[in-house]
Amino acid sequence: MKKSEKRSECPISSSLDVWGDKWTLLIIRDLMDAKTCTYGDFLKSPEGIATNILATRLRALEENGVILKLEHPDSKAKVLYKLTQKGIDLLPILVEINLWAEKYFTIPAERRASLEAVKRDKIGFIETMIKELGG
Amino acid sequence: MKKSEKRSECPISSSLDVWGDKWTLLIIRDLMDAKTCTYGDFLKSPEGIATNILATRLRALEENGVILKLEHPDSKAKVLYKLTQKGIDLLPILVEINLWAEKYFTIPAERRASLEAVKRDKIGFIETMIKELGG
DNA sequence: CTTTGCACTTGCAAATTGCAAGCAAAGGTA
DNA sequence: TACCTTTGCTTGCAATTTGCAAGTGCAAAG
């Protein structure tokens, strides 16, 4: 993985340099859904990320301070990944993506409940989630 | 450009299938900054997108109903690209990206003013912008 | 009627992705 | 203690995508 250098000073561009590809935000999503994930948990997601891609993305996210690695309480063979504050702060973006998607895609049943909660009280939803994620 | 098929039913994943790469959201940004852009306008952006990449991205965005092509009033040799409602609806996402970036990057001077406007009144800013973009 | 500008397309090398296999360390089982 | 399994990666390699440079076709300007 080549060192990704900033393409410009634009905030959108700088942000995309950190998480702007087809896989990274899915990792973030998994961590927001589950609070912590092991390497194997990410591999279980329905999109089917390849193991080498997952490894490079996790390393980049860690280097960028978006996630961190923790010891697993049960076993040294396992690793726990968790969002940092910087990662948790991506939540409003994920929320808005969900709201956009709701308008233009069919949302699967298991995602509907949290979407309704967002629509009922976006700010409250985000505050609650941030607390749960340990920010 | 291969037909990009949906990787899953997840709203985040479906959204990324449409605009989740390092270039597409910069095209959207340019259109939100300028309301309409020509092909050459996109090429002038500081990130320096290659002409072939630009062409494939514009085609995909058009096929996905995010942008549309208009005749240029001055000349048939020119083309105007413009956001559809579906594209305009991406504004809240771009706004949240800007707010995230503000926390973790240095924002260039020319971007600060609109960021302050967002922070002062996010909903008002979005409403005003949507009107300007002709939604 | 030649030149210039604009919107792309094409060719090709280099980088990235995706798939399958491999591997070391930790833990469980006998 | 020896042996299998799980977990978290790394490696090799083909296929796809990117990035750069050059080229093409059509309008409009001179």
Image (cartoon, coloured by chain):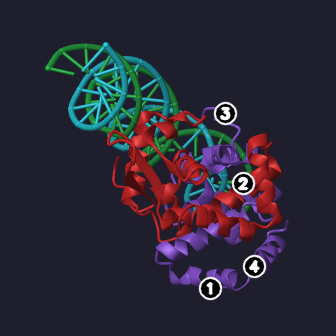
Chain colours: A red, B purple, C cyan, D green
- Looking at the picture, which amino acid does disc 3 mark? Glu
**Label total for image:** 4
Closer to the camera in the image, B63 or A116: A116
Q: Are marks 2 and 1 in contact (CB under 8 Å)?
A: no
Label 1 or label 4, whichever comes before in sequence order:
1
Question: D25 left or right of B109?
Answer: right
Label 1 and label 4: CA atoms lie apart by: 12 Å
The residue labelled by disc 2 is A98
Please provide percent x and percent y for residue A74: 39, 43
Do callouts 3 and 2 mark residues in contact (Cβ within 8 Å)? no
Q: Counting residues from the N terminus, which is met first, the one under dot 1 or under dot 3?
A: 3
Residue position marked by numbered label 4 in the rendering: B125
Q: What amino acid is found at the position of numbered circle 2 in the picture?
A: Asn
Q: Label 4 vs label 2: CA separation?
A: 20 Å
Give the distance between the C-alpha atoms of the residues marked 1 and 3, in whole angstroms. 39 Å
Pick the residue in front: A85 or B16.
A85
* Amino acid type indicated by mark 1: Ala
